[in-house]
Amino acid sequence: MINISRLKVDFISGTQSKKIIEGIDVHVDEGESVVVIGPNGCGKTTFLHTIAGLNDNYSGTIEIEEDRSRVALILQEIGLLPWKTVWKNATLGLDLQDVGDKSRAEELLERLDLMKYKTDYPSQLSGGERRKLGLVRALSVDPKILLMDEPLVSLDEFTRERLQNTILELWKEKGLTMMLVTHDIEEASFLGERIVVLTPSPASVKEVVGNETMGDVGFRRSEDFYGTAQKLRESLP
Ligand SMILES: Nc1ncnc2c1ncn2[C@@H]1O[C@H](COP(=O)(O)OP(=O)(O)O)[C@@H](O)[C@H]1O
Ligand SMILES: [Mg+2]
């Protein structure tokens, strides 16, 4: 469970203080998937970093009913280590937590078809494969909560849809509590049980769109999917 209330963030540069987040309330139940959508530059990354504990400079409350070691974050720029192999990147979280058993990373690499690149380096992978490796690394530590910042940005449409399907399957299978931020309307409509629409900077909640019938791959072709996408289009600036 994640509970965020009255979250505010100001950034101070020199003598100037700039409002980045003006007040966000979001609740994510255990096992729920919430997508936060907003235009570029509205404060989504700042929001997610603050929830993940990477920014102490906020007011309001952030409650996460889970041990920090069970919270995984996938950054917008993925954060793979270029000097480490695919295998070493995949097992990084396990190494950091001193877990000797690497079987979960191995299973995920197999499942996402990356095992064949085990001894390669991230620079030898395609954009989609790098994104998959980020997902493997995040999930190999068996998190309960998964936070993702624009996880599929700058991929071709085909790869993006395939990876959205993968994220959906993993979310359901592992019962993850998921929060994803994006500026992509179709991604939000496909992956969010609820979608929180943010205003342009400084960010606050403009609207929350329910999308309860999502949850399988065929949803992309349903009327509800188009209905949700249309609501988001009307709500976004
Ligand atoms: N460390 C920082 N110091 C000052 N301003 C920042 C910092 N990080 C981001 N910003 C500003 O905060 C605003 C929101 O940025 P960001 O959270 O990255 O938006 P988004 O992810 O929605 O594109 C932008 O105007 C950006 O310039
Ligand atoms: Mg961002």
Image (cartoon, grey):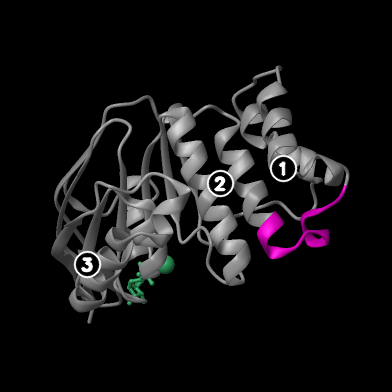
Q: Earlier in the sequence, mark 3 or mark 2?
A: 2
Residue 70 in which image quadrant: top left
Asked if the residue at label 3 sits under 8 Å from ligand 1, the reply is yes
Task: Identify the residue at image location x=47%, y=45%.
Answer: 168
Residue 136 in which image quadrant: top right
Residue 79 in which image quadrant: bottom right
Q: Earlier in the sequence, mark 2 or mark 1?
A: 1
Residue range corresponding to the magenta coloring: 120-129
Quick check: is 126 in the magenta stretch?
yes
Residue 199 position within the rendered picture, expressed as x and y whole percent measured from the top left: 19, 73
Identify the element where label 2 is drawn.
helix
Kind of residue sitting beneath label 1: Asn
Apparent side of residue 234 relative to residue 53 in the rendered image (left or right) = left
Label 3 and label 2: CA atoms lie apart by 26 Å
Front position among marks 3 and 2: 2
> Residue lying furthest bottom in this view?
237
Is 56 situated above or below 92?
A: below
- Residue 118 seen from this side: yes
Q: Earlier in the sequence, mark 3 or mark 1?
A: 1
User: Residue 198 shows which numbered tag?
Assistant: 3
Residue tagged 1: 89
Along the line of sight, which residue is nearer the eye, 157 or 35?
Answer: 157
Residue 156 position within the rendered picture, expressed as x and y whole percent measured from the top left: 61, 71
Residue tagged 2: 166
Identify the element where label 1 is drawn.
helix
Is 120 situated above or below 128?
A: above
Front position among marks 2 and 1: 2
Quick check: is 125 in the magenta stretch?
yes
